[in-house]
Amino acid sequence: IGRPVPGTRAYVLDGAGDPVPVGVPGELHLAGVRLARGYHRRPGLTAEKFVPDPFGDAPGGRLYRTGDLVRYLADGAIEFLGRIDQQVKLRGFRIELGEVEAVLAQHPGLRQVAVVARDIRPGDRRLVAYLVPRDDAGPDVAELREWAGQRLPSYMVPSLWTTLPELPLTPSKKVDRKALPEPATAGELPDRPYRAPRNPTEEIVAEVWAEILGVERIGVDEDVFVLGAHSLLATRVLARLVAVFDVDLPLRCLFEATTVAALSQVLLEALEAQIAELTDEEVAALLAQEGEDR
């Protein structure tokens, strides 16, 4: 965006109306002699968008809330990051796409970011991040997802990631979201590494995740969230595994153990811990039940 023109003041404010530091995203507010009186015959919208100016000297001054998500750069210029009113509802949560973009844009390995909600298949809507890396290598998607997970709630972390050389732009130099390509789903990702399950636990975990994600197979070292997993799918996987293994497991384990191998190890440790807590009588009863089942 650059800098304000003469006669106009620009402020980058947070949700409470306080100025944010350089580099931190916020909503662009404008003030000055060029400000309009309001919206024609729309008093409600005028009251929402034109708010009192606590920073000016003139009494009765107003700020215009632009709805643009921006941040100040070190040289004093303002960088446009997206629209704060690009809100979507996903799995019961309301998500500001601009907020997700603003967080991802802070990653040092990214030059541009766009985030949209896409219907991958009927009933399966996901957040998709489109990335333009600063160099040819770019950040690893698994590392980037972990980095985002430390700064965003799990439901705001994109489940699909697509790297592009440049983002498509409109004639006004804003991201042309309609021109963004369809993201690759798990089954379409090229050169997926595959290492087969090595024990019955890994076989069950891999089978459950593959079925939930809608792919033919999953290697034990593949990150399921890179393949498109998200919180709702993780909840379904947890329910299946709890039913199969009859073990108590918190949902957070699936976000920490993101591969088949890691989750299988967590399951085995949980089973061992439950067995260690059994009394001699409970162990004898279980052995007797197993003998009857045979």
Image (cartoon, rainbow, N blue to C red):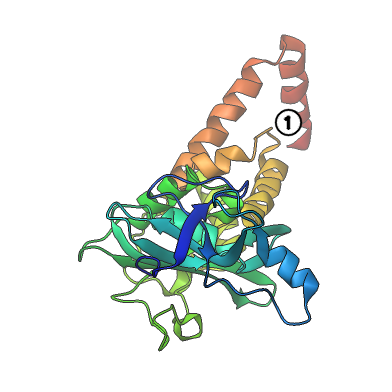
The answer to whether 175 is drawn above or below residue 26 in the figure is below
Residue, x 33% and y 74% (percent of image)? 164
Residue 91 image position (x, y, % from top left): 70, 60
Q: Residue furthest left?
A: 136
The answer to whether 290 is drawn above or below residue 1 in the figure is above
Q: Dot 1 surroundings within 10 Å: few (below 14), some, or many (20 or more)?
A: few
Q: Is residue 201 visible?
A: no
Circle 1 residue: 290
Q: Nearer the viewer, residue 115 or 49?
A: 49
Residue, x 64% and y 40% (percent of image)? 251
Q: Is residue 203 visible?
A: yes
Q: Residue furthest front?
A: 58
Residue 170 image position (x, y, % from top left): 42, 86
Residue 253 image position (x, y, % from top left): 57, 38
Label count reads 1
The answer to whether 133 is drawn above or below residue 147 in the figure is below
21 displayed left or right of 264? left
Image quadrant where residue 130 sits? bottom left
Q: Secondary structure at mark 1?
A: helix
Q: Quadrant of the C terminus?
A: top right
Q: Nearer the viewer, residue 43 or 100?
A: 43
Residue, x 54% and y 28% (percent of image)? 269
Q: Residue furthest top?
A: 280
Q: Quadrant of the N terminus?
A: bottom left
The answer to whether 161 is drawn above or below residue 122 in the figure is above
Residue 264 image position (x, y, % from top left): 51, 40
Q: Nearer the viewer, residue 119 or 233?
A: 119
254 displayed left or right of 280? left
Q: Amino acid at mark 1?
A: Glu
